[in-house]
Image (spheres, coloured by chain):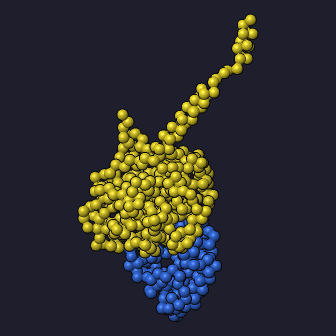
Chain colours: A yellow, B blue
């Protein structure tokens, strides 16, 4: 009796009225959309930077190219002024936001540097739009954390190129407007192929133009663009110098190697256009440099990709490849932790400035307060940057 | 009689010694010298800075030196190490660079110019085209100054033994400049 009742109940079709069904589906869709929008919009907010005592004022790229005002291309320029005569240096991080040591080094400078003579200008997030998205198909995490005394401080892990939402569509072939050099269409969104830039061009070209204008207007003497590259890329652990800056770069490289830091020098290829080290050197008065440290998280041969890979630089696949002759850096189980990469960037900057001072003794630029390689490797980056804000 | 024999023996030893000396070791490096590259790597920039800015040796640097640049030169310092980028920037390929280096060092040899091979690029400037250029310069060089990291397989030891050259192996890049300077003293 009982089992036949259950059977008859089970046989009854569950009748839900169509409008109820529609409402449930709509509700689910709205929830998914809200969650996606929350994450999506969260990517647009830039990481906080806590200006140190050395920061005299904060300018913006739109001060140098007004069309950027209110756009995702506008970004902060931190001005650290000693008030003493001396040279002006520009340090640019975040040209490629997936090369984490660049923006981290720039943030470290803003939060710790004390300029003793001359001026230091720092742009931590040069391609701000590229920080607003990442490459999930590459397994790239949206952010990573640096341990600080008060807890983990999060940093965005962006993409190499300007967000397509801000600059779309890509051309089939990107033709450099001056040299007619042809590159893949996506390179139209690469800030480091857009120099010297165009005031009436795409968002990326206008960002590039604002930085070139800044270099000219602020009479920057030394300009350094901070980058990273994958272990299988030949331009790595190196300073790329414009022809005019070759001797300065050689002195810096020699002194870095004297400190036991294997950082070589490459000359900026004259026939590869649109790059910072080439176009800043050709189109402005600045001595132009680009630095590269090893970053396994952006390599093609990497294994598991997660926030830990960005921070520790330890990767099982690269370890297996060590000694195969396919990598351009030594790779051990120590990996390339972010402290080491930032330490190398800081030392490269200091040695470039040391070489500049040696060759231009009348107008030195001296930057103090910034931890060096040994300090960073031994104590960690989180000991020096502003600690994470405590959650209430 | 004994005195005469001693004098003759000493004279013979001196004469044989002088001839042996001429046959196996060339003159010490002397000024004026010229710095050049074999392979167009940026290693020449660093060696140039070390010798001229740091040690004030006043040695001109011509990365793409040709035979006519050797007029009046007594020592040719060749910084060996291949850079494809460097070759590209100079508008050369490996064949053209090999031909230039070959004719340069052969001319130097004909003119009795002392050749010093310098290798500072470590493992990155070994193998392939770099080794091809090393094998071109090594037989005509009397002195090799080599940073240890580039001699892990003892290639320069073997070449120095085969070519009766003097090998100076230094631990670090920073030691290379003083080692080259010492050759001139």
Most foreground residue, B75 or A56: A56
The residue sitting at 44% across, 53% down in the picture is A72
Residue A228 versus residue A333 in the image, above or below: below
Location of residue B151 (image quadrant): bottom right
Q: Nearer the viewer, residue B106 or A381?
A: A381
Residue extending farthest to the left is A83
- In the image, taking residue B56 as reference, residue A24 lies left or right, namely right
Q: Measured along the vertical axis of the image, is residue A297 above or below residue A36?
A: below
**Position in image of residue A90 (x %, y %):** 37, 63
Residue under the point 28% across and 56% down: A56
| Residue A13 visible, this angle | yes
Q: Is residue B147 above or below residue A151?
A: below
**Residue shown at 31% from the left, 63% from the top:** A119
**Residue at 57%, 59% in the rendered image:** A170
Q: Position of residue B95 (x, y in %)?
A: 64, 79
Which quadrant of the rendered structure holds the N terminus of chain A?
Answer: top right
Whole-percent x, y for residue A264 in the image: 48, 66
Residue A50 x %, y %: 34, 49
Q: In which quadrant is the C terminus of chain A drawn?
A: top left
Closest to the observer, A48 or A197? A197
Q: Is residue B161 visible?
A: no
């Amino acid at each position: 009796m009982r089992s036949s009742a259950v059977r008859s109940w089970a046989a009854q079709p569950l009748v839900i009225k169509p409008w109820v069904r529609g409402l449930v589906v709509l509700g689910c869709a709205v929830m998914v959309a809200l969650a996606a929008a929350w994450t999506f919009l969260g990517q647009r907010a830039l990481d906080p930077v806590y200006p140190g005592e050395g920061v005299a004022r904060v300018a913006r790229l739109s001060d140098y190219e007004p069309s950027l005002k209110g756009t995702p291309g506008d970004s902060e320029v931190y001005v650290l002024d000693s008030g003493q005569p001396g040279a002006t240096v520009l340090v640019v991080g975040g040209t490629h936001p997936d090369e984490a040591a660049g923006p981290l080094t720039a943030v470290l400078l803003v939060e710790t540097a004390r300029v003793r003579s001359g001026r230091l200008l720092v742009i931590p997030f040069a391609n701000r739009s590229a920080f607003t998205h990442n490459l999930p198909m590459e397994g790239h995490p949206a952010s990573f954390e640096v341990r600080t005394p008060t807890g983990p401080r999060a940093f965005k892990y962006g993409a190499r190129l300007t967000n397509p939402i801000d600059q779309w569509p890509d051309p089939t072939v990107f033709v450099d407007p001056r040299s007619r050099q042809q590159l893949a269409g996506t390179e139209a969104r690469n800030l480091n192929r857009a120099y010297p830039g165009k005031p009436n061009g795409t968002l990326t070209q206008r960002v590039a133009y604002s930085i070139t204008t800044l270099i000219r207007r602020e009479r920057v003497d030394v300009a350094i663009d901070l980058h990273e590259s994958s272990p299988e890329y030949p331009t790595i652990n190196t300073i790329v110098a414009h022809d005019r800056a070759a001797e300065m770069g050689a002195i810096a490289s020699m002194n870095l190697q004297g400190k036991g830091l294997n950082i070589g020098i490459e000359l900026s290829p004259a026939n590869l256009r649109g790059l910072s080290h080439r176009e800043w050197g050709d189109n402005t008065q600045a001595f132009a440099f680009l630095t590269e440290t090893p970053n396994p998280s952006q390599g093609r041969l990497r294994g598991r990709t997660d926030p830990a890979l960005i921070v520790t630089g330890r990767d099982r696949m690269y370890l297996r490849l060590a000694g195969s002759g396919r990598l351009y850096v030594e790779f051990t189980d120590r990996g390339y932790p972010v402290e080491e990469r930032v330490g190398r960037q800081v030392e490269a900057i200091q040695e470039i400035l040391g070489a500049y001072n040696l060759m231009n003794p009348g107008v030195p630029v001296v930057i103090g307060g910034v931890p060096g390689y040994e300090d960073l490797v031994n104590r960690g980056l989180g000991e020096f940057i502003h600690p994470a804000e405590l959650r209430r | 009689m004994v005195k005469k024999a001693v004098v003759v023996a000493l004279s013979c030893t001196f004469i044989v010694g002088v001839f042996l000396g001429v046959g196996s070791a060339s003159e010490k490096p002397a000024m004026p010298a010229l710095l050049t590259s074999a392979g167009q790597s940026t290693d020449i920039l660093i060696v140039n800075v070390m010798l001229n800015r740091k040690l004030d040796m006043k040695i001109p640097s011509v990365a793409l030196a040709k035979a006519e640049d050797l007029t009046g030169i007594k020592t040719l310092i060749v910084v060996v190490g291949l850079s494809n980028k460097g070759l590209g920037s100079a508008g050369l390929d490996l064949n053209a660079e090999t031909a230039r280096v070959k004719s340069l060092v052969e001319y130097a040899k004909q003119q009795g110019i002392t050749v010093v091979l310098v290798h500072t690029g470590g493992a990155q400037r070994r193998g392939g085209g770099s080794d091809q250029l090393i094998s071109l310069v090594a037989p005509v060089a009397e002195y090799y100054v080599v940073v240890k990291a580039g001699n892990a397989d003892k290639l320069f030891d073997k070449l120095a033994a085969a070519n009766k050259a003097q090998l100076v192996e230094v631990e670090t890049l920073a030691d290379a400049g003083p080692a080259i300077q010492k050759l001139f003293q």
